[in-house]
Image (tube, rainbow, N blue to C red):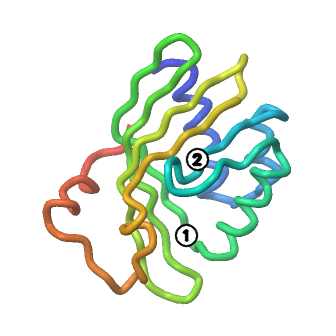
Amino acid sequence: MGQKIEILKRLTDVWRETQDIDAVLEFLTDDIEWHYSAVTKPPKHGKDGAREFLDAYKAKVRNPNWRIFNYAEKGDQLLVEGVDEFDLAEGGHVAVPYMGIYEFRGDKICSWRDYFDRGVADMSGDDELPDYAKALLDKPAV
């Protein structure tokens, strides 16, 4: 495995196991640009912006299980395919297939872009994915 995927896996482990926002921020540069919902929402800038997003996300999410199925590394970039799966604080379960692009400066993420179906992400938790979408979730994680 490449070095960048290992860094991202450590970040996802921290989030899944502890949801420690300060620990997650250690993986990011001070000037991170994070398109947490590329195309549908404006990006967050800097660690303060990342903290703002993570605080709001943490308030809504329980038992996060962020899994990566495929990845490719080239230079300072990492491309991943996976699923962001979690329980909602108010009840229900959501699983969102996604693609992410991470750019690194040294061993820290300086740019982060997540691409996914906003409609799936906004499901109530009682809604069920169609079978063809469920097939995207049933893969072994790297």
Task: Give how far across and how far down residue 60 sits, in percent.
Answer: 62, 76
For disc 1, the neighbor class at 10 Å (few under 14, some 14 to 19, many from 20) is: some
Viewer-closest of 88 and 31: 31
Q: Quadrant of the N terminus?
A: top left
Kindly identify the residue that appears in the image at 52 percent across and 47 percent down. Answer: 38
Residue ID for mark 1: 63
The residues bearing labels 2 and 1 have C-alpha atoms spaced at a distance of 12 Å
Which residue type does callout 1 highlight? Asn
Q: Is residue 21 above or below residue 103?
A: below
Viewer-closest of 85 and 30: 30
Answer with left or right where residue 34 lies relative to residue 82. Answer: right
Answer with left or right where residue 82 lies relative to residue 15. Answer: left
Kindly identify the residue that appears in the image at 35 percent across and 54 percent down. Answer: 97
Q: Secondary structure at mark 2?
A: helix
Q: How many marks?
A: 2
Q: Quadrant of the C terminus?
A: top left
Q: Secondary structure at mark 1?
A: strand
Residue ID for mark 2: 12
Counting residues from the start of the chain, the first of labels 2 and 1 encountered is 2
Task: Give how far across and how far down residue 128 sits, in percent.
Answer: 27, 78
Q: Is residue 103 above or below residue 81?
A: above
What's the mark number on residue 116? none
